Image: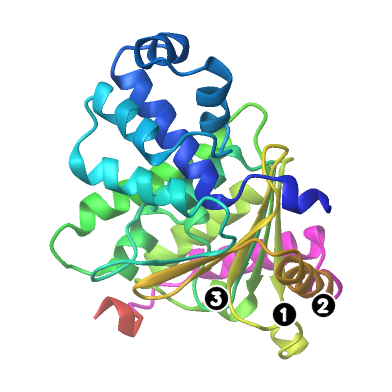
């Protein structure tokens, strides 16, 4: 059996974390819960590690003991039943939340993050002004920006994850929010690009469509197998099947060859930062109108 088949799935990991939080918030310990319900400690521990070992009835007893609300109970029971299903299509209402539970959980535990963006900058690199320009003046936009920027705490972890961002040249040249906003954003990119654990690679316009299959994020961790994240307007997809991961690794290999190296990318960003600093044009992107 392959190693990937032995690893917990995305659903099982999220279930285990949810159950762990429920027990913790109830002020109980794992052994205490097991003793109160006549369960074995290993069986409950296996559930926490993403391995189903309890019946629905026993799991429901745990959730009731921990005073878990109905919606969360139903969510955890569903995740437990689907714990062996690989890949996950998640639907949202009117749009993707700024802190998607599953994505943020993987970002926090990832040792390596590869992010490929063809239309806008990676959210982990947004400034407040750039994010607000993208979100517009809708109600709650300010709160959404705060939530988006909070995800950047991943860079302050010790140790921080190794992050590699592939961004098309047109993205950093687009005047999202106008000259002042973009000038601040490009200077932020330059500051971030000198971090030892972060690599910002610019895909030059001259590279054409090399490796272009759409934007995606690939995350790796010592705690779970590699995961690919694809984001749409109202839904997101998590991929974890080995064949899918291999396909996206091939895209990264192609981009590694066609993108500017770290030094040349920094030189391009530096030149653009200088250019924007010297401009006084009130040009505004249509996204800001």
User: Label 3, label 1: how many angstroms apart (C-alpha)?
Assistant: 10 Å
Nearest-to-viewer mark from 2 and 1 = 2
Q: Secondary structure at mark 1?
A: loop
User: Label 2, label 1: how many angstroms apart (C-alpha)?
Assistant: 8 Å
Give the mark nearer the N terminus: 3 vs 2: 3
- In the picture provided, is 218 more to the left or to the right than 81? right
Image point (48%, 55%), residue name = 82
Q: Secondary structure at mark 2?
A: helix
Please tell me how many numbered marks the rendered image carries. 3
Q: Which residues are magenta?
A: 255-282
Q: Is residue 165 magenta?
A: no
Q: Main secondary structure of the magenta part?
A: helix
Q: Is residue 272 magenta?
A: yes
Image point (58%, 29%), residue name = 46
Crowding around mark 1 (Cα neighbors within 10 Å: few <14, some 14 to 19, many 20+) is some
Q: Secondary structure at mark 3?
A: helix
Q: Position of residue 146 (x, y in %)?
A: 30, 47
- Could you tell me if the residues under marks 2 and 1 are in contact, i.e. CB atoms within 8 Å? yes
Q: Nearer the viewer, residue 123 or 62?
A: 62
Which quadrant holds residue 155? Answer: top right
User: Label 3, label 2: how many angstroms apart (C-alpha)?
Assistant: 16 Å
Which residue position is annotated with label 2?
258
- In the picture provided, is 152 more to the left or to the right than 76? right
**Residue 289 to residue 57: above or below:** below
Q: Nearer the viewer, residue 126 or 57?
A: 57
- In the picture provided, is 231 more to the left or to the right than 250? left
Q: Which mark is residue 171?
A: 3
Q: Which mark is residue 204?
A: 1
Q: Position of residue 171 (x, y in %)?
A: 55, 76
- In the picture provided, is 84 more to the left or to the right than 136? right
Q: Position of residue 71 (x, y in %)?
A: 22, 46
Q: Position of residue 215 (x, y in %)?
A: 58, 74
């Amino acid at each position: 059996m392959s190693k990937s088949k032995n690893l917990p799935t995305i659903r099982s990991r999220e279930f285990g974390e949810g159950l762990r939080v429920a027990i913790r918030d109830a002020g109980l310990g794992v052994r205490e819960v097991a003793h109160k319900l006549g369960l074995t400690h290993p069986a409950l521990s296996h559930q926490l590690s993403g391995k189903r070992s309890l019946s629905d009835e026993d799991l429901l007893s745990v959730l009731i003991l921990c005073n878990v609300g109905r919606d969360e109970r139903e969510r955890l029971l569903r995740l437990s039943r689907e714990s062996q299903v690989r890949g996950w299509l998640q639907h949202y209402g009117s749009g993707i939340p700024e802190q998607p539970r599953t994505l943020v959980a993987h970002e926090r535990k990832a040792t390596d993050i590869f992010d490929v963006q063809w239309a806008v900058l990676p959210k982990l690199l947004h400034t407040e002004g750039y994010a607000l320009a993208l979100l517009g003046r809708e109600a709650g936009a300010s709160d959404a920006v705060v939530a988006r920027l909070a995800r950047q705490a991943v860079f302050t972890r010790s140790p921080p994850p190794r992050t590699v961002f592939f961004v098309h040249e047109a993205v950093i040249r687009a005047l999202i929010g106008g000259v002042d906003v973009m000038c601040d954003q490009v200077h932020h990119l330059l500051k971030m690009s000198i971090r030892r654990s972060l690599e910002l690679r610019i895909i030059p316009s001259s590279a054409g469509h090399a490796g272009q299959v759409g934007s995606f994020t690939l995350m790796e961790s010592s705690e779970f197998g590699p995961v690919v994240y694809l984001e749409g307007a109202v839904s997101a997809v998590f991929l974890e099947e080995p064949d899918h991961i291999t396909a996206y690794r091939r895209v990264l290999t192609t981009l590694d060859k066609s993108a500017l190296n770290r030094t040349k990318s920094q030189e391009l960003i530096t030149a653009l930062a200088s250019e924007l600093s010297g401009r006084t044009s009130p040009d505004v992107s249509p996204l800001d109108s």
